Image (cartoon, rainbow, N blue to C red):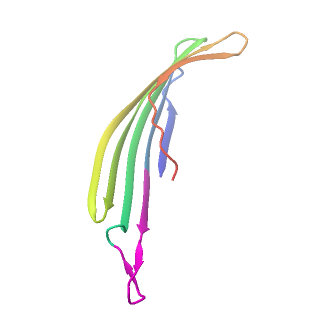
Amino acid sequence: SQLDFNTPLNEKYTLELGAKHSRNAFVNILEYDTLTPGNTWSRYALLSNDLKFEENIVAAYSTVKVKLNTLWAMQTGIRAEYTQVQVSSKNTPNGYAFLRPFPSVYFIRKSKQGNEFKVSYSRRINRPDF
């Protein structure tokens, strides 16, 4: 789920706020069976495994856009993410949690011909698709 809010504060400043929550979870069951001398199948516990994975991410951001003059503008912001991961394998739980900041700053220069030139810095994170 995601929520975004954008409002101009005046002719010079624009404020953006937002929040997002995402959850990924899966279960992977690996069964290794052996054929017993009595011709029945039996689970071989040493090689079998039940893996459970759950990831929760809660994020919030704030951005301020500033029109400096007719040619220059600036945008700066911060995004904070709290990530919590739980993994259990063979009924042994493991997990971790952390909070990370993701700052950004942009400088935009408009030319008299209508082109835009941007210089930016932002810290990002790449995650695999599930």
Is 128 above or below relative to 120?
A: below
Is 4 above or below relative to 115?
A: below
Q: Residue furthest bottom?
A: 38
Task: Measuring from the top left, give residue 5's x and y in whole percent.
Answer: 49, 40
Magenta-colored span: 22-44
Q: Residue furthest front?
A: 37
Q: Residue furthest right?
A: 113
Q: How many marks?
A: 0
Residue 33 image-quadrant placement? bottom left
Report the residue at 39% width, 48% height from top: 57
In the image, residue 27 lies in the stretch drawn in magenta: yes
Camera-side residue: 100 or 8?
100
Task: Measuring from the top left, give residue 6's x and y in whole percent.
Answer: 51, 36
Report the residue at 48% width, 46% height from top: 3
Task: Measuring from the top left, give residue 20's x and y in whole percent.
Answer: 44, 46
Camera-side residue: 53 or 20?
53
Is 92 above or below relative to 104?
A: below
**Looking at the magenta stretch, what is its main secondary structure?**
strand
Q: Is residue 75 visible?
A: no
Report the residue at 33% width, 49% height from top: 84
Camera-side residue: 19 or 25?
25
Q: Is residue 43 visible?
A: yes
In the image, residue 42 lies in the stretch drawn in magenta: yes
Report the residue at 28% width, 65% height from top: 91
Residue 112 appears left or right of 15: right
